[in-house]
Image (cartoon, helix red, strand yellow):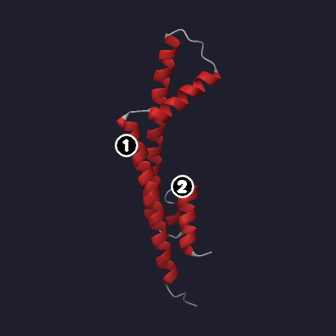
Amino acid sequence: MRNAIKGILCSALIFPGAGQIILAKYYRGLMFFVVAFVSGILFLTAVVRQAVLSLQDTVAQGVVVDVSKVMSILTETSTYASSVYLQLSFLVFFSCWLFSVVDAWRLGKQLDQKPSGG
């Protein structure tokens, strides 16, 4: 399999930075991985925080809470959340993922064009 295809598939489907690591650019891959991981954790934290606040409001209103109610609150929170913090962390994660895929493709193309020494 060509290096460009391996890099794209790993960064796009596994995790940002995986393509760079497969292509032996460890430091670069680790940078993408750390940024994506931290922003992903921040995104999940913001979603859970808003869901807990919504759940507390629901309980305070005296509504019976069951699994389906919790799932609907989580869905609404992740879909309609207006927190700047939430949106920013998602934007950072998505940008990191996109740049990682493009960078892995570019690195793979460079490796594919090098003459193999043999």
92 versus 115 height, above or below: above
Mark-to-mark CA distance, 1 and 2: 19 Å
Disc 1 and disc 2 in contact, CB within 8 angstroms: no
- Residue drawn 55% across the image and 74% down it: 3
Density class for disc 2 (Cα within 10 Å; few <14, some 14-19, many ≥20) is some
Answer with the quarter of the image where residue 89 lies.
Answer: top left
Q: Residue furthest top?
A: 62
Q: Residue furthest left?
A: 84
109 versus 34 height, above or below: below
- Residue drawn 49% across the image and 76% down it: 109
Considering the numbered disc 2 on the image, is that residue within a helix, a strand or a loop? loop
Density class for disc 1 (Cα within 10 Å; few <14, some 14-19, many ≥20) is some
- Residue drawn 44% across the image and 34% down it: 46
Quarter that holds the N terminus? bottom right
Kindly identify the amino acid type of the residue bearing the numbered disc 2: Phe
Quarter that holds the C terminus? bottom right
* Residue hosting label 1: 88
Kindly identify the amino acid type of the residue bearing the numbered disc 1: Leu
Q: x and y percent of residue 117 in the render?
A: 54, 89
* Viewer-side label of 1, 2: 1
* Residue hosting label 2: 15
Q: Nearer the viewer, residue 83 or 15?
A: 83
Task: Indicate which disc residue 13 carries.
Answer: none
- Residue drawn 54% across the image and 29% down it: 74
91 versus 5 height, above or below: above
Q: x and y percent of residue 103 in the render?
A: 44, 66
User: How many labels, in total?
Assistant: 2
Q: x and y percent of residue 71 in the render?
A: 59, 28
Q: In screen coordinates, is 49 left or right of 88?
A: right
